[in-house]
Amino acid sequence: MNANIPRAAIAALALLGVLGPVTAGPPRVYRGPEGEMPRALRAPGADEDDLRPGRLGAPGGRVEGLARWQFWWETNRDAFPAPDGRAGGQTPFAAVLGRPAAKLADPTLRRIAATLAPGLEAADPAEREITALALAATGDPAASGLLARLLNSARSADRRVAALALGLLGDDGAAEPLGAVAADAGRPAAERAAAALGAGLLRHTGSAAALAAGLAASFGASGREVDDYQAACVTALGLIARREDLPLLARVAAPGSRRSDVVRAAAAAALGRSGDPAPLPVLRALLADGSAPVRRAAVEAIGRLADPASLDAVLEMLAGDGDLLARNLAAIAAARVGGARAREALLRALERNMPLALREYAALGLGILGDGRDIDRLVAVLASPEDPSLRSAAALALGLLRADSALPLLHSIALAPSADDELRSYCVEAISVLGDGGIRPLLPVLATAVGCAHLRRGAALALGRVPGPRADHALLGILVREGDPYVRGAAALAFARLPREAAVDALCGMVESPGFSRDARLSAIAALGAAARAGRGWTLTPFLDGLPFHALTPALRLAYGIL
C-alpha cells in the first residue's frame, strides 16, 4: 500500500483480513434506479421527465421504476414520522428506525470538517459536490464561508449543490442570500430552484417573502425548468411552514390555479410537510381532483398529518381510484392514520384478487400500522411461492412489527443461495430491524456474496445497525474493495445509523491519502458526511423529505446509494 497512507487508515484496513476478501464480481456501470432493481423497467419511450414527481404512470397491475414500493421505502425508511397516541397497540415506528441517541464529540466533528474542506477546491466535480453535502452535515460554522464561496463558482452544478448544502448546514445567515438568488429572475431556473430548496431547508422565515414573490413573478411562464422552480418554491414554503403562507399553497394546489400538475402536486405535498392541520379540508377536496399526480400528493399529505377525519376519503381512494399509484399511496396513508377500519382495508387490499403493486403497498402498510394480529398473515405471504417483490414487502413488514416468531423463516431465506437476491436483501434488513444478533456474525459474509448486488447492499445497510469494530471494519472494507457503486453508496449511508467514533480516523485517512482509488475516496467522503449527521444525533435521509428526487445530482445519488 502507498506509503502516503496515514497510519489511522493502515491500522483500520489491516484488520480487514479477519473478514476475508471482499469479492464484488466485475464492476458495472450505474444506470439509475431502473438498472439497479430487478423488473423495474420504465415504459418504452420514457425519458428523464418521467422520473420527476407527478410524472409517473402505472398501467395494469404492476408499477415500475420509481413507482415501486421499494423506492418509497428507500426515501422514507429513516424519515417516517410516527404520530403519537394512535390506538390499537401499534409499534411506534420512530422507536424502530429513530435517530441515534449517542453523539460524536465536538473535536471529532471538527476533525471531519477539516478533512473535508479541501475537497471544495478539488478538480473533480463529483468530489466537490459530495464534499459540499458532507461538509454541511458537520454543522461546522466555519463551513458557511467555504460554501458561500462555492455558491459563486463558475460551474452551475457547484452553485446548485452549494445552495442545498448551505440549507443543510443550518446557518441562518444564509437565508437572505439564498432568498435573493431564488428570487433573481436573471439567474438560471435550476439555480433559483436549488436556492429555494436551500432556503426551505433552513426553515428560516426571513426568506419566505422572497420565495412567495419569486413564485408570483413566474406565474404564466411554462416549461420544465419553470415547473421545477415553482415546485421548489412551494416545497420550501411548506418546509418553512409559516401559517400565513398556507393559503398561498392551497391556492397553488387548487384546480383553478392554472399551474402545471407538477407544481400543484408539489403544493399539496408542501401542505402536508407543513405539519399544520389547517389545510386538511383543502387536501380532502384534492382527493377528488382530476389530476392523478395531485391526488397522489394529497393523500400522502393527509397520511403525514395522520388525520382520522380524513380516513373515509382515504379508504375510498384505496378501494377504487382509477390511478393505481394513488391507491398504493392511499394504503400508506391509511396505515399512518391507523385504527381498525384502516387495518381491515389493508387486509382486503392484500388479497390475491388485488393488483400486485397494491398488495405490496398493503403488506408494507400493515407493518407500519403495527398490529401484531397480522403477523401470521404476513408470514404466510413470505412463506408462499408468490412474487418475490410482494414477499420482500411482507418480510420488511414483519421486521417493523417486531415479529420474533418470523425469525427462523427470515433467516432461512436470507441464507438461501437459491432465493431471489432482492428478497434475501429485505429479509436481512427485517432481521436487522428486529435487532436479532444471530445475523450479525454473518453480515460481513453476506456483504461479499458474489453475483448478489442487492444482498450485498442489504447487508451493508444492516451493518449500519451493528455497533463495534467488526462492523466498522466490514463497512470500511466495502468502501475500499466493492466494485458496485450502489453497494458502496449503501455502505456510506450505513455510517448514518450509529455514531462511529472509532471509524472516523480511518475515513479521514482514506480521504487525505492519494493511495486509495477515486471511488474509495468519494465513498469515504460520503461516509464522513453520514457519520457527521449521526454524530449530531440525526439520521441522513430526513433531508430527502424536503428535496424532490431530481434535485439531487447523479453524483450525490450514487454517493449514498440512493435509488
Image (cartoon, helix red, strand yellow):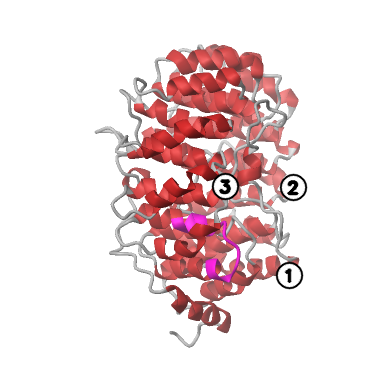
Residue shown at 41% from the left, 50% from the top: 425
Contact, mark 1 vs mark 2 (Cβ under 8 Å):
no
Q: Note whether 454 is above or below 236 in the view shown.
A: below
Residue at the left extreme of this rendering: 44
Residue shown at 51% from the left, 43% from the top: 405
The residue that disc 3 covers is 541
Q: Note whether 345 is above or below 420 in the view shown.
A: above
* Mark toward the start of the polypeptide (3 vs 2): 2
Q: CA distance from mark 3 to mark 2?
A: 21 Å
Residue 407 appearing in the image:
yes
Relative side of 21 to 236, left or right: left
Residue 80 horizontal/vertical position (percent): 60, 38
Residue 359 horizontal/vertical position (percent): 41, 27
Residue 324 image-quadrant placement: top left
Tell me the number on the disc at residue 172: 2
Q: CA distance from mark 1 to mark 2?
A: 23 Å
Query: Closer to the camera, 388 or 207?
Result: 388
Relative side of 401 to 309, left or right: left
The residue that disc 1 covers is 107
Q: Amino acid at mark 1?
A: Pro
Residue 316 horizontal/vertical position (percent): 50, 12
Q: CA distance from mark 1 to mark 3?
A: 24 Å
- The prevailing secondary structure element of the residues shown in magenta is helix
SS type, badge 2: helix
Q: Amino acid at mark 2?
A: Asp
Q: Which residues are magenta?
A: 459-471
